[in-house]
Amino acid sequence: MNEDLIFSVLYSREGLLNMLEEVLAEVNSAMESAIEALRRDLSTIRTGRASTAMVENLRIDYYGNQSPLSQVATLSVPEPRLIVIKPWEANLIPDIEDAIRAEKNLGLNPSNDGSVVRLPIPELTEERRRDITKIAKNRGEDARVAVRHARKDGNDMLQDAQKEGEISEDESRSGQDRIQKLTDEFTETIDQITKNKEAEIMEV
């Protein structure tokens, strides 16, 4: 085998490996995004304890821009069942209260003294805890669906590459096996995150 042919084979093999790794990296990134979205969604779900994460991403109209509450106010938890919101400008208070009341999953009633918004977190009833747990389960299922979509997209890319003769059937199958392993790992992570949130919600 002459040097040009050897170089061609090695270059082709390197390109193949890069293509496979790019597909896997893309699938991994999509699945990580699903996990991040789940964590973000679950952080807004109310439990019996106060947490600034419940409200920090509420959108407030700030001079024509929809800004997260955390970027237009200082948030604190001075007591286990109280969130205090101090807006940078007092004229934002009505918008902040409206945004909180509009978030049905929170079910909270803010009050203000003209300079800060106080958000008491009442203790949840058993029935309300179970209702909120169902919301958490639904968010977990949404994340599982997103992971399955990422798996399908990755498998489709590998199958298309196989049809185009860019990779062999064995290489396509190997790539799909690796994608399935990623799917299993991320699904297990989603299940654990969701179970932890459910336990937090049900904790009295």
Image (cartoon, rainbow, N blue to C red):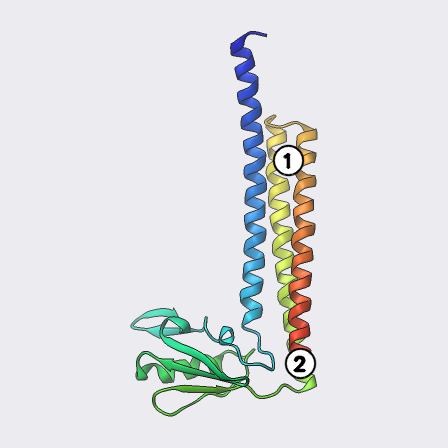
Q: Secondary structure at mark 2?
A: helix
Dot label at residue 129: 2
Image height check: is 45 above or below 125?
A: above
Where's residue 46, x and y in %? 57, 78
Image height check: is 163 above or below 184?
A: above
Dot label at residue 139: none
Where's residue 144, x and y in %? 65, 58
Q: Residue furthest top?
A: 2
Q: Nearer the viewer, residue 9 or 141?
A: 9
Dot label at residue 159: 1
Q: Nearer the viewer, residue 156 or 14?
A: 14
- Callout in the foreground (2, 1): 2
Q: Where the C terminus falls, by quadrant?
A: bottom right
What's under tag 1, amino acid-wise? Answer: Gln
Number of residues whose C-alpha sits closer than 10 Å to that of mark 2, classed few (under 14), some (14–19) or many (20 or more): many
Number of residues whose C-alpha sits closer than 10 Å to that of mark 1, classed few (under 14), some (14–19) or many (20 or more): many
Mark 1 and mark 2 in contact (Cβ < 8 Å)? no
Where's residue 135, x and y in %? 63, 72
Q: What residue sits 41% from the left and 74% below the top?
A: 69
Q: CA distance from mark 2 to mark 1?
A: 45 Å
